Image (cartoon, grey):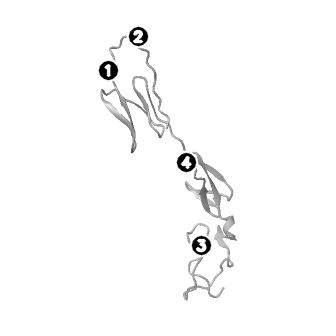
Amino acid sequence: MSCGPKIEASCTSSIETMSESSECEEGCFCPAGTLENQGKCVALEECPCKLRGKLFQPGTSVPKGCNTCTCTSGKWVCTQIRCGARCAVLGDPHYTTFDGKHYDFMGKCKYYLMKGENYTIESENVQCSGAISQVREIPFTEEI
């Protein structure tokens, strides 16, 4: 073309459509309605997606938590399912947080495990004598 865009839209740029400008350059450009991708002109639907430095072809799906993301027209489109979570406190004491991290904490105190607008869940660490108790210890697990 004798007068093409100064910056050509490509699959890797965020520029999908260029506005008409009085500034232009002579050269080779992709036809209208296509984007440059690795030296070729492709339709937007053929653009790959980038994730952690790697390119993924359109239609590729990857997990993201309990959701799935699919490469569509150069962008990741993810399902919006609300993921479930679980926390737990058991034993002498072992804590598991909603994000799956594990902690062992032997402090002697009461702790808020969770607070909401109209509820709280608390835990209390109590020092034991070390002797076998006649009271059966029942692990407490709260699932939200």
Residue 118, disc: none
Label 4 sits on a secondary structure element that is: loop
Could you tell me how far apart the alpha carbons at marks 2 and 3 are, in whole angstroms?
72 Å
Quadrant of the rendered structure where residue 112 is? Answer: top left
Distance between the alpha carbons at the discs numbered 4 and 1:
39 Å
Depth check, mark 2 against mark 3: the one in front is 2
Ranked by sequence position, the earlier of labels 2 and 3 is 3
Q: Residue furthest front?
A: 118
Which residue corresponds to mark 3?
Answer: 16
* Residue type indicated by callout 2: Gln
Front residue of this view, candidates 144 and 19:
144
Q: Which mark is residue 127?
A: 1
Q: Amino acid at mark 3?
A: Glu
Q: Up-down: is 74 above or below 25?
A: above
Q: State the CA–CA distance, disc 3 to disc 4.
A: 31 Å
Picture coordinates of residue 52, whole percent (x, y): 55, 54
Q: Which residue is mark 2?
A: 134
Q: Nearer the viewer, mark 4 or mark 1?
A: 4
Q: Secondary structure at mark 2?
A: loop
| Disc nearer the start of the sequence (1/3) | 3
